Image: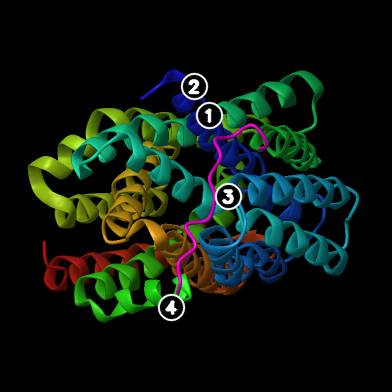
Amino acid sequence: MEWKLYFALSFAMFMEYAIWGAWMPVLAARLLGPLKMSGKQTGWIYATFPIACIFMPLVSGQLADKYVNTEIILAIAHLLGAVCMYVAVRKTTFKSLLVVMFLYSLCYCATLPLVNSLMFHHLGKVYDNEDAINAASANIFIWAPIGWALIAWSLTGWRWKFKTGEKGSDCLYLAAVLSVIMGLGCFFLPDTPPAGAGTAPILQAMSMFTGFNFLVFIAVSMVFFALMQFYFLGTAPFMQDRGIPAKNVPASMGIAQAVQAIATVALMASLMDQIGTKWTLVVGAACWFVLYVAYVVQKPRWIIIACQPFHGLAYVLFVIVGQIFANSLASDEIRGSVQSLLFATTTGVGLFAGTQFAGVIMDKFRKDGKFQWRSIFIVPCAIAFGAILVLVIFLKG
């Protein structure tokens, strides 16, 4: 692969997840803290993201496969997203912030599957076999957790110096700036015209649900994406309640992405070769189970930070391996739509169900303004164990 292509694809992957990582892990602390929102309100604001993911990836995938260059869609969507995020900084009431975050999510969620499909499209032109594509994609996927982790640590450094952690609006400013950089940079990505599929690409992609293995994989993935919202909604306020300063929370959670980066190049491909896709997915799912067990235990306090790497490992071995698995089943003319279908069902339906479920559970176990974290995290712990059993029994590897 030429270095120019590698740089372009890596830039897109880095920036895509840096933007996401700038606000997703820490916005809940602003909502539940300075803005005094309830767990249910926080859940609804976070729900704007998965709701948008239910249909925007399908729209953008259809456009990219049939009508418009992928890099142009990415550029326009991110620039519009920057405007929305800048407006969100000034919104302090539930209804106004809900509307702005939904508009932002419409823009950002349209881009998520396109970064993957753009990468797989150009790697498919360079390499002629699946193993080579998987190995090359690992060297690009690594920039996703690096982007997320570097932004988390940068935000922590900013909060140390400028004391902005208590208000929490700095994460929105950061996401806006990064969106502008990404939007402008997308105009310089490799030319990626639509394949021009004759039949509606999304209908071809949906036919994959007739395969039992794919159906089981999607169902279990939706469950774990739902449970992931306990991590995103709960971890930041949980850490702060356990005595970890707000300014240290982004860096503490960023440990997961540092481990994710290492695992992407040092573990993912070799583990898939040694134990196969099924058991790699099982190992990834088990990592989330271990993380929630640690959250239930809670003591000593350092165990909360020490177990953050399990989220990073789970993301590599379950989410990224799942994206590779889906791509291996797709032809080039529906590649964008298949990635879009995966994002719509998991990051869309799964995360949306998770925001509502996690918000209700957090409110249920909140007394006198304080969360009963052990009771809260027992719920995803038990569900994760059951989902792992389904994966072991029913997924054929």
Secondary element under disc 1, as helix, strand or loop, is helix
Is residue 197 one of those drawn in magenta?
Answer: yes
Q: Amino acid at mark 3?
A: Thr
Horizontally, residue 227 falls left or right of residue 266, namely: right
CB within 8 Å, label 3 to label 4: no
| Mark earlier in primary sequence (3, 1) | 1
Q: Amino acid at mark 1?
A: Ala
Can you tell which mark lies on residue 8?
A: 1
Where is mark 2, residue-wise?
4
**Which residue sits at x=85%, y=47%?**
89
Q: Is residue 373 above or below residue 215?
A: above
| Mark earlier in primary sequence (1, 4) | 1
Can you tell which mark lies on residue 70?
A: 3
Residue that sits furthest to the right in the current view: 90
Range covered by the magenta-colored residues:
187-198
- Density class for disc 1 (Cα within 10 Å; few <14, some 14-19, many ≥20) is some
| Mark earlier in primary sequence (4, 2) | 2
Residue 297: image location, x then y, percent: 37, 50
Q: Amino acid at mark 4?
A: Leu
> From where the camera sits, is residue 358 visible?
no
Q: Main secondary structure of the magenta part?
A: loop
| Mark earlier in primary sequence (3, 4) | 3
198 and 54: which one is in front?
A: 198
CB within 8 Å, label 1 to label 2: yes
Horizontally, residue 22 falls left or right of residue 292, namely: right
Residue 300: image location, x then y, percent: 40, 37
